[in-house]
Amino acid sequence: MPIPLDAPEVLDREFLEIRARLLQVAASLDRIERAEGAVDDDPRLMKIRQALEILAGGDEQRAEKIQLLFSRPYEANWLATFRPTR
């Protein structure tokens, strides 16, 4: 069984990829702001802002919280709702 990496090793391994993804998010938000029109009330942008707050908050389970933020709520009757018609 491999020995798990410690925090400095994980940071060494992941830093450049994390940095690239953060730059990509920042660039996308910059493009949205510079583009014509307004999307301030768009629920998708609101969720992106909420996700950034979750990241900045430093709480545990950030990935789970963001996944739930972007997920549909559970529907007991999901199969009937999403069953393809023939």
Image: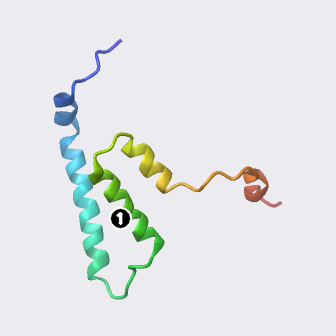
Residue 38: x percent and y percent? 37, 85
- Look at the picture and state if 33 lies above or below 54: below
Residue 83: x percent and y percent? 76, 55
Q: Tell me which residue sits at (50%, 50%) in the image.
A: 68
Viewer-proximal residue, 83 or 63?
63
Give the colour scheme of this rendering.
rainbow
Q: Tell me which residue sits at (69%, 53%) in the image.
A: 75
- Tell me the kind of residue under disc 1: Arg
- Look at the picture and state if 5 lies above or below 13: above
Question: The N terminus lies in which quarter of the figure?
Answer: top left
The image quadrant of residue 62 is top left
Question: The C terminus lies in which quarter of the figure?
Answer: bottom right
Residue 60: x percent and y percent? 35, 40
- Look at the picture and state if 43 lies above or below 57: below
The image quadrant of residue 13 is top left
- Locate residue 73 relative to residue 13 in the image: left or right: right
Residue at label 1?
49
Q: Tell me which residue sits at (72%, 53%) in the image.
A: 78
**Pointer 1 local density, CA inside 10 Å: few below 14, some 14–19, many at least 20:** few
Name the secondary structure under disc 1. helix
Q: Residue furthest right?
A: 86
